[in-house]
Image: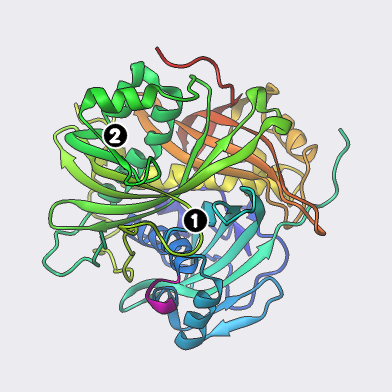
C-alpha cells in the first residue's frame, strides 16, 4: 500500500497508479486495506472532512468510554474491527463497547493525541494513517509524561450513517537503523448544515489559538480577537469553582500572562470535533501543554499539563469566532462539576458534487482566496511530511518530492531535491518509526499561493521498556506553491522554541 504526495483532485484519480515516487506505507498492506489504484473513486472535500471528524472523535470515545462504550462502537461499521498491537481483532458492537469500557480513563481525561492524518481514496472507500502520542496527564500521583506512541493504519467505508472504520490497527513506534551523529447533542434534521469550508474555517480558528496565546502577539489582542465581542473563556482548573474572563481587554490580559514569546510553542491542539447547532456550531478539542526548553533543549522539555476544551462557535462578519471556550484539565476518574460535554454519534455531511463550484475563503475582505479543496490538499501535503521523514522507504525520494524542484529547507539550509533526499536519509528512520508530531496547522492565502505554519514536537518514543522523552520542539513556517502535480513546499523553515520575554 502506498501514500502518494498530494496533487489536484482531478489528477488524483487518473494518475495515482502511474506516479512512481509514491510515499510507501511501511511493510505489506494490512488485511482489509486496499492500495489506491486508478479505479479508486475520488473523495470530495466533504468526504475528507467527515473522515477527519470520525478520527477526531475516536480519542474522546476511547478515553471517556462515553455511553458505556457505545459511542466508541458506533465509530465502526457493523462488521468493522479494531486490531491491537499484536494484530488481535475485536469485532462486533458489544465487544467494541466492552473494549472502550476497559480502556476508559474518565470523562475528563485526555490521553490519545492523534495528528498527521493522511487520507487516500481506495476502491472500497478510503484508507488512512495517523500518528498517536499518548500523554499521561493528571493520573493520580504519577508525573505527567509521554506514555507511548505509534501510528494507526485505517480503512474506512461509507455507510448509510456516514463514514466509519472498516478496520483500525495500532502499531507501536519502533526505530530502525540510527545514523550516528453542557452536553452537546447530535445535530438534528432541523439544524442548519455546515459546509466543508465551515469545518475547515473553524479548524483554522482553533489552530490559531495556540499561536496567539503562546506568543502574546499584539499585546494579547491577537488572542482576544479570536473571540466574539461578548464571548467568554472559563478555566475550570482556576480555583474551586473556576474562573471566567469576558471582554476584549480581559482576554488580552489573560494572553499576556505566563511564558510568552514570538518563537515560544506550548499549546499543541488536536482531535478537533465539530458539530452543527441551530446557533452555529459546538466543538471539542484536546490540548497538550508542553514546556519546551529554550532552543529545543531536550533536558529542559517536559509535559506540563493538558486537557480538553469545550467550545461554542458563532459566525460573525469577520468569520467564525469563539462564543465560549471552557478548559478542563485532564484527570482520571470522575470529572469536576459540571462535567465536559459528551460527543454524539457522528453524522454524515451533505454530499458535495465533485464538479460543483468551490467555495472560497481565507480572507474576509476580498483578498486572495483558497478553496476547500486547496485547504484539504495543503493539509494532506503537511500530514505526509512526518511519514516521509521518519519512515523514509525510498532513500529520501518521497520526502524530496514533497518540495518543488527549487525548494529550500532551512536549519540546516538544504536546497534542491537531491540534497533534501540525502538529508532525510541521514536522519533517524525506520518502517514503524514515529517521531515528528505536527499540530496547529494554520494556512493563509497569498497572491503567489499560500503560507502556513505548524507546531512540531519531536518525541523519542521509548522502546523495550525505556522511557520516552521530548527531543525538541518549535514550529515550521512554510511557503506553498501550486504546481502541475498539486501543492508543494516552496520553502520550509524550522524555528526552535524559545521562551523569550513576556509580552508587554
* Residue 159 in sight here: yes
The front one of 448 and 200 is 200
- Outermost residue on the right side: it is 180
Residue 217: numbered disc: none
Write down the residue under mark 2. Answer: 362
| Structural crowding at the residue carrying mark 2, measured as other residues with C-alpha within 10 Å and reported as few (<14), some (14–19) or many (≥20) | many
- Residue at 48 percent of width and 62 percent of height: 59
Q: Is residue 424 left or right of residue 308?
A: right
x and y percentages locating residue 311 in the rendered image: 29, 48
Dots 1 and 2: beta carbons under 8 Å? Answer: no
Choose top left, top right, bottom left or bottom right for residue 112: bottom right
x and y percentages locating residue 489 in the rendered image: 54, 33
Q: Which range is magenta?
A: 65-69
Q: How many marks?
A: 2
SS assignment at label 1: loop
Q: Is residue 63 above or below residue 286?
A: below
Task: Please identify the dominant SS of the magenta region.
Answer: helix
SS assignment at label 2: loop
Assign the N terminus to one quadrant of the image: bottom right
The front one of 413 and 470 is 470
- Outermost residue on the front side: it is 240
Q: Does the magenta-highlighted stretch encompass residue 90?
A: no
- Residue at 85 percent of width and 44 percent of height: 178
Write down the residue under mark 1. Answer: 331
Q: Is residue 375 above or below residue 113?
A: above
The tag earlier along the polypeptide, 1 or 2, is 1
Assign the C terminus to one quadrant of the image: top left
Q: Is residue 374 left or right of residue 419?
A: left
- Residue at 46 percent of width and 59 percent of height: 13
Q: Is residue 236 left or right of residue 498?
A: left
Q: Is residue 433 left or right of residue 243?
A: right
Amino acid at each position: 500500500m502506498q501514500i502518494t504526495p498530494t496533487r489536484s483532485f482531478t489528477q488524483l484519480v487518473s494518475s495515482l497508479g502511474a506516479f512512481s515516487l509514491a510515499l510507501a506505507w511501511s511493510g505489506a498492506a494490512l488485511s482489509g486495506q486496499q492500495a489506491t489504484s486508478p479505479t479508486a473513486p475520488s473523495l470530495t472535500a466533504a468526504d475528507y472532512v467527515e473522515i477527519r471528524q470520525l478520527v477526531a472523535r475516536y480519542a474522546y470515545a476511547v478515553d471517556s468510554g462515553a455511553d458505556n462504550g457505545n459511542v466508541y462502537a458506533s465509530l465502526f461499521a457493523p462488521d468493522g474491527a479494531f486490531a491491537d498491537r499484536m494484530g488481535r481483532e475485536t469485532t462486533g458492537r458489544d465487544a467494541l463497547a466492552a473494549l472502550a469500557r476497559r480502556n476508559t480513563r474518565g470523562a475528563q481525561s485526555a490521553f490519545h493525541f492523534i495528528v498527521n492524518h493522511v487520507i487516500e481514496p481506495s476502491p472500497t472507500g478510503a484508507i488512512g494513517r495517523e500518528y498517536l502520542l499518548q500523554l499521561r496527564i493528571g493520573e493520580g500521583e504519577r508525573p505527567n509524561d509521554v506514555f507511548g506512541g505509534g501510528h494507526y493504519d485505517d480503512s474506512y467505508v461509507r455507510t448509510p450513517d456516514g463514514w466509519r472504520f472498516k478496520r483500525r490497527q495500532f502499531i507501536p513506534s519502533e526505530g530502525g537503523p540510527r545514523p550516528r551523529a453542557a452536553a452537546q447533542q447530535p445535530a438534528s434534521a432541523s439544524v442548519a448544515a455546515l459546509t466543508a469550508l465551515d469545518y475547515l474555517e473553524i479548524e483554522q480558528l482553533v489552530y490559531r489559538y495556540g499561536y496567539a496565546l503562546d506568543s502574546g502577539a499584539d499585546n494579547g489582542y491577537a488572542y482576544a480577537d479570536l473571540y466574539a465581542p461578548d464571548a467568554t473563556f472559563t478555566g475550570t482548573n482556576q480555583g474551586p469553582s473556576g474562573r471566567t474572563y469576558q471582554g476584549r481587554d480581559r482576554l488580552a490580559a489573560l494572553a499576556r500572562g505566563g511564558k510568552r514569546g514570538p518563537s515560544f510553542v506550548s499549546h499543541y491542539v488536536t482531535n478537533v470535533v465539530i458539530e452543527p447547532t441551530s446557533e452555529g456550531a459546538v466543538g471539542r478539542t484536546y490540548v497538550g501543554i508542553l514546556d519546551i526548553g529554550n532552543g529545543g533543549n531536550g533536558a529542559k522539555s517536559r509535559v506540563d499539563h493538558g486537557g480538553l476544551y469545550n467550545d461554542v462557535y458563532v459566525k460573525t462578519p469577520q468569520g467564525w469566532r469563539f462564543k465560549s471556550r471552557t478548559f478542563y484539565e485532564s484527570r482520571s476518574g470522575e470529572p469536576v462539576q459540571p462535567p465536559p460535554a459528551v460527543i454524539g454519534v457522528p453524522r454524515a455531511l451533505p454530499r458535495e458534487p465533485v464538479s460543483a463550484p468551490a467555495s472560497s475563503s481565507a480572507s474576509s475582505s476580498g483578498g486572495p482566496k483558497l478553496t476547500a479543496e486547496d485547504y484539504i490538499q495543503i493539509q494532506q501535503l503537511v500530514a505526509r511530511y512526518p511519514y516521509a521523514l521518519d519512515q523514509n522507504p525510498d532513500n529520501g525520494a518521497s520526502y524530496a518530492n514533497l518540495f518543488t524542484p527549487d525548494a529550500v529547507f532551512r536549519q540546516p539550509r538544504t536546497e534542491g531535491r537531491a540534497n533534501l533526499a540525502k538529508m532525510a536519509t541521514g536522519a533517524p528512520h525506520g518502517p514503524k518509526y514515529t517521531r515528528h508530531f505536527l499540530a496547529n496547522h494554520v494556512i493563509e492565502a497569498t497572491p503567489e499561493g499560500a503560507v502556513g505554519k505548524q507546531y512540531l514536537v519531536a518525541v523519542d518514543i521509548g522502546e523495550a521498556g525505556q522511557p520516552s522523552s521530548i527531543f525538541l520542539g518549535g514550529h515550521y513556517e512554510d511557503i506553498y506553491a501550486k504546481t502541475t502535480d498539486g501543492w508543494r513546499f516552496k520553502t520550509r523553515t524550522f524555528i526552535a522554541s524559545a521562551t523569550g520575554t513576556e509580552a508587554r
